[in-house]
Image: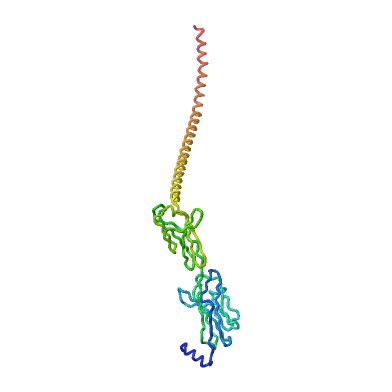
Amino acid sequence: MGPTLRLLVLISITGCVEPISVSTPQKHVNVTIGESALLQCTFESTDQTTGLTIQWDFVSPPSMTPQQVFYYQKGQNVIPSPYKGRIQPPPSPGPTKNASITISNMQLSDAGVYTCQIHNFPDVVGQSEANIVVNVLEKPSSPYCSVHGDVESGHLVTLTCHSERGSPNPKYTWIRLDQTKTRRPVLGRATETGILEIRNISQFEFGEYLCTATNSAGFSTCTLELFPEAKDGVIAGAVIGAMLGCVLIILVVWFIAHTLKKHKYNMVKKSEANEMKRSSPQAQEATDSVTLATPASNLHAERDEPQA
């Protein structure tokens, strides 16, 4: 049985019915990530609300597959598991004719189209649903600024700026800051995607550059310095580092040579001392021999004198 035939059967059974009217004061709702979104939906019906049913569906742009968010029938609330703890159902929707819900802790995945469908049998004709487009906003994350090219007079220098997160996609602007932090317009070609090209850069374009990423949720900034001295400073630092490395190598070599020389000197002294110790007993023996020989020669001399 088709929808039209089913509707005719219901009308024939119930007789004359009044149309139901469902509306919402907001067709678009913007909410910041992490905050709560109030989705307002009201209805008008001349019949009793004993047969009232309320259903909220959600469709995200990528999938386009409807997903049930909330269901109400005969005083009972049904909340699917992905939304449990996040949905605040409408209090007393029958008497108040208010089917609004509140979704907490909104995330980027919650952005899409929400549909409020209401049926109040026997009111089965009329405008029974209303759509709300929900945008989840996220402030741009701190952008990353970088320099491409040789920062020298007459060269092409490109500055880039990009935020990893942000909804909707942020737009980027560049300004130059002078020594007093006063904002100056840039002289290069800038795009809203965060690219700044400076052709034939001169001394008038050196300085500090500020990039601002902006969307409807807020803004974030990053800065970088564009000075030719920065490159000279890097070279000077490398030269100084190399010189310090050479000095350190020389000191290490001198220390090793000095240590070896000192060790060799100590070995020579020790060898000489051992040699002296070995030669001392031999000298003592020679001395004793001379001492013993002298009295013997004197004795022979004394014996020879009377014979003369």
Q: Position of residue 244 (x, y in %)?
A: 46, 44
Whether 10 is drawn above or below 102: the answer is below
Image-quadrant location for residue 243: top left
- As displayed, is residue 52 above or below residue 205? below
Residue plotted at (53% across, 81% down): 23
Q: How is the image coloured?
A: rainbow
Corner quadrant of residue 34:
bottom right
From the viewer's side, name the closer residue of 98 and 57: 98
237 lies above or below 193: above
Of residues 221 and 283, the one nearer the viewer is 221
Left/right placement of residue 250 relative to residue 54 reads left
How many marks on residues? 0
- Residue 266 position, x and y percent, is 49, 34
- Vertical comparison of 199 with 3: above or below: above
Relative to 252, 95 lies left or right: right
Residue 25 locus on image (x, y percent)? 54, 78
The spot of residue 78 in percent (x, y) is 56, 79
User: Farthest residue toward the top?
Assistant: 308
Q: Nearer the viewer, residue 220 or 60?
A: 220
